[in-house]
Structures are given as structure tokens and as C-alpha cells.
Amino acid sequence: MEKFAFIMHPLDARGDISRKYPFVRHLPEGLVEWGLKFKGPMAISHITGIKSLTGMEAEGWFVGCPLTARQMMTLPADYVVSKIIDAARTAQESGAGIVGLGAYTSIAGDGGITVAKNVDIAVTTGNSYTIATAIEGALKAAPMMGIEPSQAKAAVVGAAGSIGRTCARILAKRVPELNIVDLQLEPLNKVAEEIASESAAAVKVFTEVHEGIKDADIVATATSAVTAIIHPADIKSGAVVCDVARPRDVSNKVAKERNDVLVIDGGVIAVPGDVDFGFNFGFPPKMAYACMSETISLALEGRYESFTLGKTVSIEQVDEISAIAAKHGFKLAGFRSFERAVTQEHIERIRNNARRRILVK
């Protein structure tokens, strides 16, 4: 039996925590965050029932790191990393041979490098498989919206980050035009130079989200923003937007106000076997985030080594983890949008709404 663990943390002070402790939703956020600083890591659930297509089996544990996304972004980095290390040690004590870093635990500090140095088990951020499935999902959804990638303009928001940069490099090989968006121009220019050296796509750089995505047919977004940065007026009618970020980059208002764009959640994966996660993190049964699935795939493969660490992800890593995951039976679990399943009929309605909107104009 292969063994793994995955570190989770509450994205906000009330919503996520209230899934386990309902009374928390009635408390002020500041009070909840204050209390979290005095809490240690804890095993949240025991994960059972995972069985690979090869016959290998695995069990694991969700381990909670008691800091919200806002705390991870605003508290001193050394303090945040120390809390993540404590959670990784709890994973080690549970018997795991590899631990995955979820959400902001993969972003804090140096992207898991320091964590890996302070525990005796392997560590991975899961970013390689997150990238693989985000691109797969976006390119699969595009034709369903009448978009031919070989003739489309794409945009990547957060393109200077570890996930966004590699997403941009891969997308640049599939589309003729690519806009890359991030806060700072200098790192964006470096990404643009890298893309220019390995693909023929025409690349433009932007530091304003609206300007960068307003004419894009396909958008992938993967920033570390604490609040939504993509709003209803930013998106082109008929576009596909793949939101990899947690917390979300795409505002909930888009779901309410733009019935002519398709927003899909990045990296929703069907896990092989009769898996029971023992914890409700907002997905249907037997489904997981891609970062979780990378961790499980590596365990099933017996690859107890730190696979994706730091602030860069290579295309070779993306290809390798894709092959490993497919071997064991992991696959994209259809489409989901704002925590709800997206049907073919729903996509067709969005496509028709986009056509009508274009005709009206």
C-alpha cells in the first residue's frame, strides 16, 4: 500500500472552516484568523479506496495548515513557512512517503524547497499536473464554443508565475497569438523572450488585466491574488476562461452577469478506484484537484521524490506527470464552473448566447 498526504488550508476565515466547524460562520473574520495563529496542524481525514489501473493501491491523509490565504500572503514569510513545515512533519508522522502542497502552501516562500529540506519525505507542489490539465481543459472546451485554437488569440494571466509561465509556453505552441499578463513588466518581457525563442506565436505583454484579455478567445488565469481580478466587463463574448487559481481569479459576478462566456475550473480530476476522501472540499465524490492528483500519482508510481518544487516548472515535467497520471487512470473529470458541473447543453446555451450578442452588436 503506497502512502501520501496532502496539505490543505482554509482559503478564507469562515467559508472553508465552517465545513468542519459550522459555528465559525457566525464569528468575525478577524477573530477567526487570530485564533488560527494559535492552532497547530492537524490530520483532517484518512483517504481510502484509491486503486490504479495497474492494480497498485494507495491511502493518504489530508493535513490542515491553520492559516488562511490572506494570512499566508500578509504574515512574515518565515512564520508562514514554519507553519507549513509543521504540517509536513505531521504528514510524515502519519506515515506518508510524499506530501503535496495545496493552494497557498505551494506559493509561500520558495515554493516548497525549504519545506523539503526540513522533512524526511518527498514534497511536491502539484503544479506540473495542474498546468497539464488546465491546458487540456481549455483546449478541449474551445472547439465546443466554436473556437479553433490554431486560429485563436489566447491570454495567460499571471504569466510570470510558476504555473502561468509554463501555461504560456505550452499555449504559444498551439495558438498564433498570445497575450501575457502580470503586474511587473520586466519578468513578463523575459517570459516573452523565452516564448519567442521556442515558438512562432506573436506575443504581447500587458500589466492590466482588462487590456490583456479583452480580445482573447481563450484565457488561462493562475495568479496568487487574494481577491478576484477578472470581472464581467473584461471578457470577450464567446470566450473560454480556465481559472486555475484558488481563491478564484474570476469574480462570481461573471457567472451571474455573463451568460455568453464559458468559465471552467482548472484541474478537476477523476481519481481511480472507489476513493473516499473523508472530507468535503466542495467537489463531487471521487474527484480531486490536479495538484492532489499529482501527489497521489507519484505515490502510486512509487516515485517518493520531490517532483515539482520552486518557482519554475519545465514542459518536460508537465509531459512526464501527464504520462504517469494517465498510466494510473487519472483523467479530466468533464467541466465544472463555480463548483457546478457543466453539461454539453449548458455549453451550447452559452455558445448561442454569444452568437446572439455578436449579432446584436
Image (tube, rainbow, N blue to C red):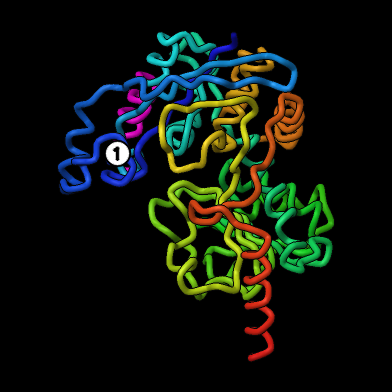
- Residue drawn at x 54%, y 56% as measured from the top left: 337
Q: Is residue 83 magenta?
A: yes
Q: Check the picture and name the quadrant holding the C terminus.
A: bottom right
The one nearer the camera, 131 or 133, is 133
Q: Residue 323: where, in percent of width, then height?
A: 77, 29
Which range of residues does the magenta coloring cover?
73-86
Q: Check the picture and name the quadrant holding the N terminus.
A: top right
Q: Residue 49: where, in percent of width, then height?
A: 56, 20
Q: Quadrant of residue 81?
A: top left
Q: Is residue 87 magenta?
A: no
User: Which residue corresponds to mark 1?
Assistant: 17
Q: Is residue 50 left or right of residue 154?
A: left
Callout 1: few (<14), some (14-19), or many (20+) C-alpha neighbours within 10 Å? Answer: some
- Residue drawn at x 49%, y 42% as measured from the top left: 283
- Where is 1 relative to 243, above or below? above
Q: Residue 47: where, in percent of width, then height?
A: 48, 21
The one nearer the camera, 113 or 283, is 283
Secondary structure under the numbered disc 1 in the rendered image: helix
Q: Residue 192: where, in percent of width, then height?
A: 69, 54
Q: Is residue 1 left or right of residue 56?
A: left
- Where is 93 relative to 274, above or below? above
- Residue drawn at x 80%, y 54% as measured from the top left: 174
- Residue drawn at x 34%, y 30% as measured from the top left: 80
Q: Is residue 75 left or right of residue 245?
A: left
- The kind of residue tagged 1 is Ile
